[in-house]
Amino acid sequence: MPSPNEILAELKKVKYPGFTRDIVSFGIIKDIEVAYAGVTVSLTMASAKPEVVEKIVADVKATVAAMAGVPAVNVQLEQPAATAPRAAAGVAQPRN
């Protein structure tokens, strides 16, 4: 079974659709978990089109599945944490 670093090295070969950069350099890979049952790759996709997400998921599965000793591949999609809206700067708050 490959290590998380070996899997990450292979995922650097997966290009982001429409770009020359890979998905690792875009910061999409959040976590790689290696277990006896298989490999789980967690992806964080900000605001990509559904067809782009599907292509990346398919490419990740194919790339990791092609590695020796990987019995199964699971890809989890996680939404990035939403940033809390900030109070408007410079607006005086009423005092009681």
Image: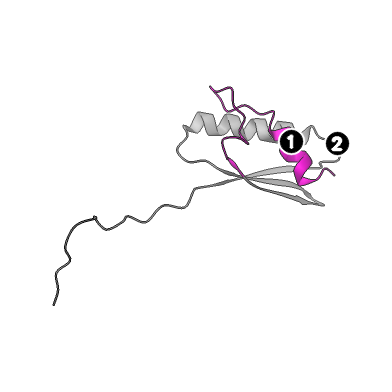
Where disc 2 sits, the SS reads loop
Who is closer to the viewer here, 49 or 28?
28
The image shows residue 33, relative to residue 50, as above or below, that is: below
Considering the image in quadrants, where does the N terminus appear?
top right
For residue 7, what is the image quadrant? Answer: top right
The residue shown at (79%, 50%) is: 37
Above or below: residue 17 compared with residue 60:
above
- Circle 1 Cα neighbour tier, 10 Å, few/some/many (<14 / 14–19 / ≥20): few
Residue 84's disc is: none
- Contact (Cβ within 8 Å) of mark 2 with mark 1: no
- Count of picture labels: 2
Residue 76 in the image: state x and y as whole percent: 61, 46
Instruction: Give coordinates of residue 49: x percent, y percent.
Output: 46, 32
Residue 30 is left or right of residue 40, and the answer is left
Specify start and end residues of the magenta stretch as a single range.
1-29
Question: Could you say which quadrant of the image residue 75 lies in?
Answer: top right
Q: Secondary structure at mark 1?
A: helix
Residue 41 belongs to magenta span:
no
Determine the residue positioned at 60% across, 35% down.
25
Residue position for label 2: 68
Q: Residue at x 63, y 36 (%)?
A: 24
Q: Position of residue 35 (x, y in %)?
A: 78, 52
Q: Residue at x 57, y 40 (%)?
A: 27
Judge whether 78 appears above or below 7 on screen.
below
Q: Residue furthest bottom?
A: 96
Q: Main secondary structure of the magenta part?
A: loop
Q: Which residue is mark 1?
A: 9
| Rendering quarter of residue 47 | top left
